[in-house]
Image (cartoon, grey):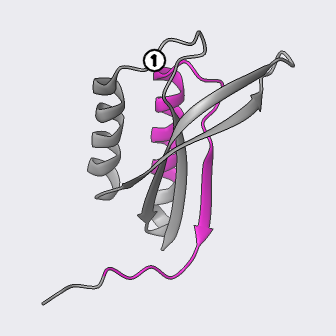
Amino acid sequence: MTKCLLLLPTNYNNGQPVESAKLDNCLGRLDSLIGGHTVDGTCEGVYRMADGSYARDTNLKVWACVEKGQVPALRKLVRVFAVELGQESIYLEQTTTTVEFVRGN
């Protein structure tokens, strides 16, 4: 499995907050594609824009585990999120690891 970290912006580049319904919609589409996610709070960072200026962002840290074959579809969905949220790009980290979902029964 591939463990992925997405950083979804909580504000548009103009500083206005992203509507919670829009973020919920993004997360719902993520769930439909890969079956689930975990929001691990927020984080702040700085990104150098294409024009050389810097943008300070507050992002939702979203973890998800996908089968290796699902990574291209996930990348495509993240690209859609970038367009919908007015971003030049969205951070997507991939780590190949062993993930186990331990059942109680």
Q: Is residue 83 magenta?
A: yes
Determine the image quadrant of residue 55. Answer: top right
Front residue of this view, candidates 94 and 74: 94
Residue lying farthest to the right in this orientation = 52
- Residue 83: x and y in percent read 52, 22
In the drawing, does residue 5 fall left or right of residue 57?
A: left
Up the image or down, 80 lies above or below 29; here it is above
- At 69% across and 26% down in the image, what residue appears? 56
- At 47% across and 31% down in the image, what residue appears? 81
- Residue 75: x and y in percent read 53, 46
The span shown in magenta is: 72-101
Residue located beneath label 1 in the image: 17
Q: What residue type is labelled 1?
A: Pro
Front residue of this view, candidates 57 and 23: 57
Q: In which quarter of the image is the C terminus?
A: bottom left
- At 43% across and 64% down in the image, what residue appears? 66
**Could you say whether the residue bearing mark 1 is in a helix, strand or loop?**
loop
Q: Does the magenta stretch include residue 94?
A: yes
- Residue 93: x and y in percent read 62, 55
Up the image or down, 45 lies above or below 96; here it is above
The total number of labels drawn is 1
- Residue 70: x and y in percent read 44, 59
In the drawing, does residue 90 fall left or right of residue 47?
A: left
Mark 1 nearby-residue class (10 Å; few <14, some 14–19, many ≥20): few
In the drawing, does residue 70 fall left or right of residue 37?
A: right
- At 21% across and 85% down in the image, what residue appears? 103
Up the image or down, 13 lies above or below 8; here it is above
Residue lying farthest to the left in this orientation = 105
